Amino acid sequence: MAKEDIYDAIVVGSGATGGWAAKELTEKGMRVIVLEAGRKLDPEKDFNEHTWPYEIRYRGKVNSRDLYGDRQPVQSKCYACNEYGKQFFVDDVDNPYTTADQKPFDWIRGRQVGGRTITWGRQSYRLSDYEFKAASRDGYGDDWPISYAELSPYYDKVEEFIGVSGSYENVPNLPDGKFLPAMKLTCGEWLLKKAVEKKWKDRRVMIGRAAILTKKHNGRAACHYCGHCDRGCSTSSYFSSPGSTLPAAEKTGRLTLRTNAVASHVIVDTATGKAKGVACIDQLTKNAFEVFGKVVVLCASTIESTRLMLNSATRQHPAGLGNSSGVLGQYLMDHIFQVSVGGVIPSVANYRYNYDDGRANGVYIPKFRNVGERNPNFIRGYGIQGGAQRGMLPANLRSIPGFGAEFKKMVRSAKDPAPFSMGIWGEMLARKDNRVTINKNKKDAWGISIAHVECSHGDNEKAMARDGLEALKEMAHEAGFETTFSSGYVAPPGLCIHEVGTARMGADPKTSVLNRFNQSWDVKNLFVTDGACFVSIGCQNPTLTMMALTVRACEYITGEMKRGNL
């Protein structure tokens, strides 16, 4: 292999963390190749944020599982895998995985340049020492090997580049960041805020902190509030790696992006024990090829990165690459999800429709359990996300009588109560028995052994869900909302699409996979910066933290490269 074919760094994955790794490393002078298992999207063909229902075959009204259940039985459980956006999700038949009996896990995936940043929910919250040092507070599990103060400057850098809109609230367990102007609350949300904050001094109702631009930023246009971010964004007004970090890396002239590159395993130099490359299979031709580099950074997503390490077992690493601790694959987590209430707000029925539904955001209520006084029934806590947004057509449209011009007039002037919904995002405790292993008896379409997932909610999560449902009901009642449905059902892990853990950071190589800089204890030039590195999940959406950790790790990588330590 010619010297010029050896890259300074190989980044596996082009999503939230892969894009940041590419940007940071190239801007610091390194030659980087990003390996993406999928294709490059064409916004003109693949994005449908401005497509009307009458422009698609089934008008968006047929259940996605009925339409795509044969090839996408898992992916179609996600609300965004529909007629507008099914192309952003993997084919489950070609990309299988197995689960333990009576322990369903819904693994939602996207293989394309940008990964899941094309469809993510964009909610962007910092963790605090209430999360990083949670074990010291309640005695369960392990603290992270870093503190909030150490990660804060990297949160700053990420937010300042991608653009996060939000309000300054001074909540100790939800640190403020570097925000663009906040979006506005709707009338119904103001009613909720006033009622909740008057009744409960430990609860705050605020606009969501979203990676959506409220003004022009870094050459990207402000959001035009079309309201359909899950279908792609032609103006790059929300953060995605193809619209933000990858172009920044390309400007350096030091980035190579290779698409349709399905990574099968990390290549290890038997003489040094270090990683020297990544073996791949072309997604289209199924031809094998290899890419070589001085550093390997895994950003393939939590389960994929761990699967890759487990499939990279060698004589030197018989239990999987970097797994001398035996911890690789353990401590899988996802948020408690779908415990919710909803209904209507009669008091705003006389207000005119004002395009509230174009705002792709909602309200956020930060964690209030186990912040001060300890709850007797469970540890940790949950945040609440929701909203009250009136749609373009009245919620009671089907019950409005009439026809023709008179009917149109009645629709436009309908006394329509705004609908509302609220749900909890709760912390799942890190447990060893929630894990990812390799099913060597089954392969994917490229002949690679698949992941086997064993994960379920425990008693703490169930107690938290019960408490969360009651809290939702009491807040809706206090605000004068009419609740028409409530559900204590906890979705199977995975469906929240916040899976983290399985290659955790730590201070002890005997009980963790990575050190405090996301570096493998066993393979010093191997780094994992996606959600696999999490020690605990907290209740905040995790992507912002993944990106901040990646920036911090890349700073360390370039420093160690200059010192000749990698």
Image (cartoon, rainbow, N blue to C red):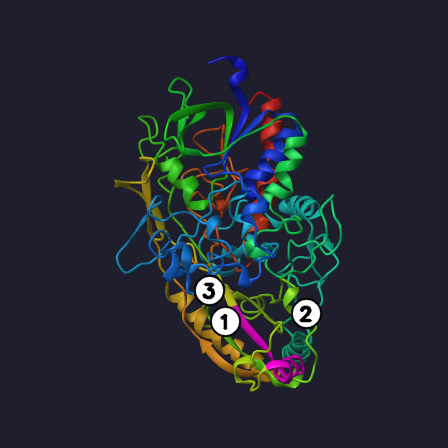
Q: Rounded to the nearest whole Å, what is the CA distance between mark 1 and mark 3?
A: 20 Å
- Image mark for residue 174: none
In the image, what residue type sits under mark 2?
A: Tyr
Kindly identify which residue carries mark 3: 337
Q: Rounded to the nearest whole Å, what is the CA distance between mark 2 and mark 3?
A: 28 Å
Q: Quadrant of residue 15?
A: top right
Most extreme residue toward the top is: 2
Is 354 drawn above or below residue 332 in the view shown? Answer: below
Confirm whether the magenta stretch covers residue 519. no
Q: Rounded to the nearest whole Å, what is the CA distance between mark 2 and mark 1?
A: 40 Å
Asked whether disc 1 touches disc 3, contact meaning CB atoms under 8 Å apart, the reply is no
Q: Is residue 191 left or right of residue 524?
A: right
Q: Is residue 80 left or right of residue 179?
A: left
Mark 2 nearby-residue class (10 Å; few <14, some 14–19, many ≥20): some
Is 496 drawn above or below residue 508 in the view shown? Answer: below
Kindly identify which residue carries mark 1: 375
Kindly identify which residue carries mark 2: 355
Instruction: Give residue 31's position: percent from left, percent from top.
Output: 59, 24
Mark 1 nearby-residue class (10 Å; few <14, some 14–19, many ≥20): some
Instruction: Give residue 289's position: percent from left, percent from top.
Output: 41, 24
Q: Toward the viewer: 350 or 555?
A: 350
Q: Earlier in the sequence, mark 1 or mark 3?
A: 3
**Residue that appears at 51% across and 48% down:** 116
- Residue 555 in view: no
Range shown magenta = 404-423
Numbered disc 1: secondary structure? loop
Mark 3 nearby-residue class (10 Å; few <14, some 14–19, many ≥20): many
User: Depth-wise, is mark 1 or mark 3 nearer the camera?
Assistant: 3
- Residue 12 in view: yes
Q: Quadrant of residue 103?
A: bottom left
